[in-house]
Amino acid sequence: MDPLVFFICLLVFICGCFIQSTIGFGMGVLAAPFILLLEPRLMPSAIVFIGMFMSAIVWYQYRHALSLRFLIFAFLGRLPGTLVAAYVLMVISTDQLEIMLGVTVLAAVILSLAKLRLAPTPINLFIGGFISGVTGTATGIGGPPIALLMQAEEPDHIRANLAAFFCLTNIISLVALHYSGRFTMADFSSIVWLLPAPIIASVIAYRIRHKIKKQVMQYGVLVLCSLSAVVSLSQGLHIFS
């Protein structure tokens, strides 16, 4: 990887991991379009791998607030969604992945702005888990469907349970990516150098978590994500070429 590209990717992941550590999700939504633009061969494996590592850190930090009863059905839904995504990745092109990523990010932004209130019932969690499995494995963005169902919970509860869910399910996604040819040893050798990002971001976020206005950060993230989604769509559709 070119040193300049690596440095930019590292900064992108630090920003994305900081956001995820603060509000519970959002690393993939922010980082995926940039990584696809800068180093497409690392998509979506880099997002899933760094997301797994980031989630493990947050899970440990907020382990006191963990309650897995919300996530059992989401986990059951994630499994078939992951299998569907693994097949999709075997048959689509880079352009199609860019379009899929752009649509996924814009959908996440719209859902966030709509402020829907869906109860975390077993059937809703299963459906949310399935959608998360498809989008999370295929594009690295699996947070919004589950976060949408948990948004009424306490902040620490959201962080802990989302982190536990994504740490465990991203392992499954990485296995699926490996067997679909999207996560090789060469990819791992490049991605492992990006691991300082979640460590740096989690330390900073944990220290200043009470000083950050959640709403301000959320709207800032939505603006940035909207711009990155437009870039992904324009790349996939070759609008400017």
Image (tube, rainbow, N blue to C red):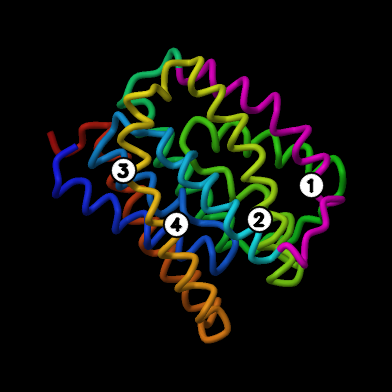
N-terminal of the two: label 3 or label 1? 3
| Quadrant location, the C terminus | top left
Of marks 3 and 4, the one in the foreground: 4
Q: Disc 3 marks which residue?
A: 35
Question: Circle 1 is placed at which residue position?
Answer: 71
Figure quadrant of residue 74:
top right
Q: Which mark is residue 198?
A: 4
Label 3 and label 1: CA atoms lie apart by 29 Å
Which residue is found at the position 34% from the left and 47% from the top?
194
Prevailing secondary structure class for the magenta stretch in the rendered image: helix
Alpha carbon of mark 2 to alpha carbon of mark 4: how far? 20 Å
Secondary element at tag 3: helix
Q: Residues within 10 Å of mark 2 (few under 14, many from 20)?
A: many
Residue 147: which disc?
Answer: 2
The image shows residue 109 at horizontal and vertical percentages of 50, 56
Disc 3 to disc 4, C-alpha distance: 15 Å
**Magenta span covers which residues?**
63-89
- Work out whether 21 lies above or below 109: below
Percent position (x, y) of residue 87?
A: 53, 15
Q: Earlier in the sequence, mark 2 or mark 1?
A: 1
Residue for point 46% across, 47% down: 105
Vertically, is 47 above or below 41?
A: below
Question: Is 64 situated left or right of 41 in this image?
Answer: right
Nearest to N terminus: mark 3 or mark 4: 3
Binning the other alpha carbons within 10 Å of mark 4 as few (below 14), some (14 to 19) or many (20 upward) gives: many
Query: Between disc 2 and disc 3, whose residue precedes?
Result: 3
